[in-house]
Amino acid sequence: MHGPQRTAFENYLTFGTGSTNPNEMLWTVDWRDYDLPYCSLYVVTPDNDWPCKVGISVSPRKRVMGLQTSVWRPLKVAACFWCPSVQEARHLEDHVHRMLTDDRKWMHGEWFDMKPGPTCEMIDFAACVVGVECNKTIEDPQLSKAISEKLLLANLGNARHSKRYEMRKMAAG
């Protein structure tokens, strides 16, 4: 598996209560928060794993939440990769889209008649073909630590919010 598979709503709920492992939570990273030129390439599917959308964003969490408003089923992040720049991510995305279209998998926009596993394999292959660095993990210890700390703060904030909510609920009822 290439990462956590959650619906967009679960993604939203678990952003502040989930893991602090940056490699498990790569889809939550907004690269601008770290003054980095990186860009994520993501694979999103409805909760039934079909079809797949392949897209790019410097803030995939925000992008997926935006997509959810126009998709008929709950979305989940099937995989999230990162590239050193928006230009490289766009180049890789374009190549993947062309390959999938040539294979007659194109459905509409950036949606393809594919399941997540084969889509991720195609992304890995396309990255090799076009020579774009496409990463599934964060190896830089300082960046990894910074992301973990931000996730921890989100967890604490969400825990406080949840406690206040429970206290209000108990007081009201």
Image (cartoon, grey):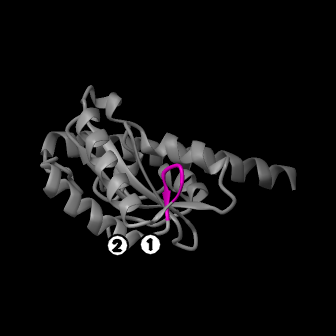
Q: In the figure, 61 relative to 31: above or below? A: below
14 sits to left or right of 97: right
For this rendering, which residue is in front, 136 or 97? 97
Name the magenta segment's main secondary structure. Answer: strand
Kindly identify which residue carries mark 2: 118
Q: Identify the residue shown where x is 16% and y is 40%.
A: 142
55 sits to left or right of 149: right
Q: For the magenta stretch, what is the residue range?
A: 107-112
Between the residue at mark 1 and the residue at mark 2, the CA separation in whole angstroms equals 6 Å
Measured as percent of width and height from the top left, residue 67 is found at 58, 47
Q: Identify the residue shown where x is 87% and y is 56%.
A: 173
For this rendering, which residue is in front, 143 or 115? 115
Q: Amino acid at mark 1?
A: Lys
Q: Identify the residue shown where x is 67% and y is 47%.
A: 69
Kindly identify which residue carries mark 1: 115
Q: Magenta segment: does it hold 110?
A: yes
Q: Is residue 20 visible?
A: no
Crowd band around label 1 with a 10 angstrom C-alpha radius: few (<14), some (14–19), many (20+): some
Quarter holding the N terminus is bottom left
Q: Residue furthest right?
A: 173
Tags 1 and 2 touching, CB below 8 Å: yes
At mark 2, the secondary structure is helix
Measured as percent of width and height from the top left, residue 33 is found at 34, 29
Q: Amino acid at mark 2?
A: Pro
At mark 1, the secondary structure is loop
Q: Is residue 73 visible?
A: yes
